[in-house]
Amino acid sequence: MDKLLWGDSGLRDAADNIILDAHQMIVTRMESLPMLRFYENGHAVALGAFEDKDFAVRTAYCRARSIPVIRRITGGGTAYLYPDQVAWSLTIQAQEFSMAQWLERLCMAVCNGLSSSGYENVYFHKPNDIYANNRKLGSVYVGMQDDVIVANGTLYRSLDISTMLRALRVPKEKLTVDGIHTAGLHFTTLQNQSAADLVNLKESLARFMAQMCNLETLVHTPWIDSVSHSPRGGHEQFPEPDHGRTYSGFLATSGGVLHGSITLDDELRISSAKIGGNVYVRPHHLFKKIQSVWYGASESEISQRMESLLYDLRWEMSGFSPGHVIKLFHRLFERNRIAQQLAITASAANSFMVHDPDGDMDAMEIAAQAEAVLVPYCAKPAWCKWRHKDGCSRCGKCDVGDIYDLAGRQGLKVTTVKNFEHLEQTLKTLKLQDTRCYIGMCCNNFYIKHEDAFRAAGIPALLLDIAGANCYDLLQEQAAYSGKFIAESAIDLEVAAKVIHIAHQSNACH
C-alpha cells in the first residue's frame, strides 16, 4: 500500500501502550498497512527490548514511588515516560535498511517535521536523539519482529529531570540541587503547545514519516480502543536470580553495554544462558536463538555454534559484532576458572571486571603482572582522617589498611583514589611509569560510566567490584564524583588478598 494510516490514541497506562504497539504490528503484518499512532503515557520506566534492569534502573526508587517498570518492543536504552510528552509508534513492513539507517531516517523525518512546524536549529544526534538549539528534545528507538519495523519516539513538552535521574542509571548523574539544574540545561521542550499547535505538529511529523517510508497518502482516522483491561501484559516480570553456579558480567562496546550470564553443569557445559544490553539487534529473537544453540555447549564450542546459527540467518548487531558476544561469554567461563583457582564462590568471581584494551589477556595474567593497587576513598571509614587523603596509617581498623599493609609488604604501590580527577591523574602517572598492569577496586556502575577514562590510559586492569553503601544506589553520585561521599563501601578482603598474592608471586619471580 502507498498510504500511512495515522491517528491519536490519547493518554493511557504505559503498559497498555506496549499492548497497542503489539496489536499495531499484527495489523501491519497481516494487512500490509503502515500505521503511525500518537499517544501519551502514564508514568513508567521503559526498558529497551534487550536491556538488563539491574544495570539500567534504580528499582528501589521506582518501587518506593510506584513507578512501573515495563519493557518496550524496541531496542536501545531505558527511557523515563510521563504524560507531558508527545509519544508515537510507527509500524511498517521492513525495507532494505539496517537498524542504524532506520534510526537515522526516522530521526531526520522527525527533524524535518519539527522544522516545518517552525522549530529552528533542529538536528539528529547519533545514535538516536533529536536536538534543538544544542539541547536534547527527544529520542527515537527501533526494533523488528517478523519483518515488521516498529519505532517509538518521544518529544518533551515539559521536563521532569529530577525523577528521571533518580529512576534511571544514566551516565554521569548530577543529583545535587545544582547538579539537577545543570542536567536540565542539556534538555529543551516543545515551545508551541496550544492544542492547535500540537495537532499541526503531529500532522507534520506524520507527513515527513510517510515521505521517509515512500508513502504518498496520509489517512487520518480515530484510533480504535483494542486494549483489554484484564491483567496487563506489558509489565515486565523479573525472575529471581540464581545464585548457584551462575556467572554473570558485562562488556562495553560502541553499540552499547552487553550483559550476559551462564549456568554451568558438572561437565562445565552451559545449562542456561542469557544475553542482553541497551543495543539494537535483528531479528528480535536473535539473542534467544543464540541462547538456545548454546545449550549444552562447552567453552570451545560456542564460536562454532554461533557461526553455524548465523550462517543461514539474516541478522544484524548494530555497533557490535558476534565477536563481542563471544568475548563476553569467554569472560563468563573464565569466572568459573577464577572461582576454582582462588577457591571462591561464583558470586565472588562475578565481582571481577577485566579491563584489557588489547583484548588478549585474562584476569589471572593481569593479576600476575600487576605493579600497583588502586583503592577508593569511600572504602575507608568515615571517621578516618585519611579518608580523603592518598595514604594510610595502617592502624589495622579497616580493610583498606589491610590492603595497604599486604600490598606494601609485597612490593606493590597502593594509591587511594580521592575523586574522579585524581583517578585520571593517577592513570596518567601509571602510564608514564610504563606500568604493565594494575589491580583496582570500584563499583561496576563507576566502571561502566567512566570506561572511557580507563580505556584512555591503555593499561590492562583487574578491577574488583565493591559492595556496601554504593553511592549510585544512595543517589549521591555527585558527592562521590567530587570526593565528598560520606557513606562506606566494602572490599572483599579475602578475594583482594588472593589477587594481590598472585601479583606478589609473579613479581618475586622477576
Image: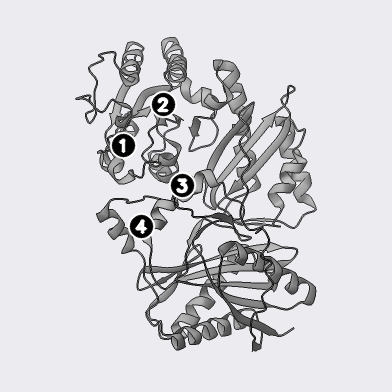
Residue 476: percent from left, percent from top: 32, 43
Residue 289, image x and y in percent? Answer: 74, 48
Q: The N terminus lies in which quarter of the figure?
A: bottom right
Answer with left or right where residue 125 lies relative to residue 287. Answer: left
- Which residue bears the numbered disc 3? 58
Disc 3/disc 4 C-alpha distance (Å): 13 Å
Separation (CA) of disc 2 from disc 4? 35 Å
**For discs 3 and 1, the disc positioned in front in the rendered view:** 3
**Which badge, 3 or 2, is on the more N-terminal residue?**
3
Reading the image, the residue beneath label 2 is 439
Compared with 96, 390 (above or below) is: above
Q: Which mark is residue 162?
A: 4
Binning the other alpha carbons within 10 Å of mark 2 as few (below 14), some (14 to 19) or many (20 upward) gives many
Q: Earlier in the sequence, mark 3 or mark 1?
A: 3
Q: Between disc 2 and disc 4, whose residue precedes?
A: 4
Eye-nearest disc, 2 or 4:
4
Q: Would residue 280 appear left or right of 447 to someone viewing this image?
A: right
Residue 365 visible in the shown view? yes
Mark 2 to mark 1 CA distance (whole Å): 13 Å
Q: Are marks 3 and 1 in contact (CB under 8 Å)?
A: no
Specify which label sits upstream in the sequence, 2 or 1: 1
Which residue in the rendered view is the most extreme toward the front?
Answer: 230
Residue under the point 64% across and 26% down: 245
Determine the CA span between mark 3 and mark 1. 26 Å
Instruction: Answer few, some or many: residues within 10 Å of disc 4's Cα (few below 14, many 20 plus, some between 14 and 19).
Output: some
Circles 2 and 4: CB distance less than 8 Å?
A: no
Question: Which one is closest to the eye, mark 3 or mark 2?
Answer: 3
CA–CA distance between discs 4 and 1? 28 Å
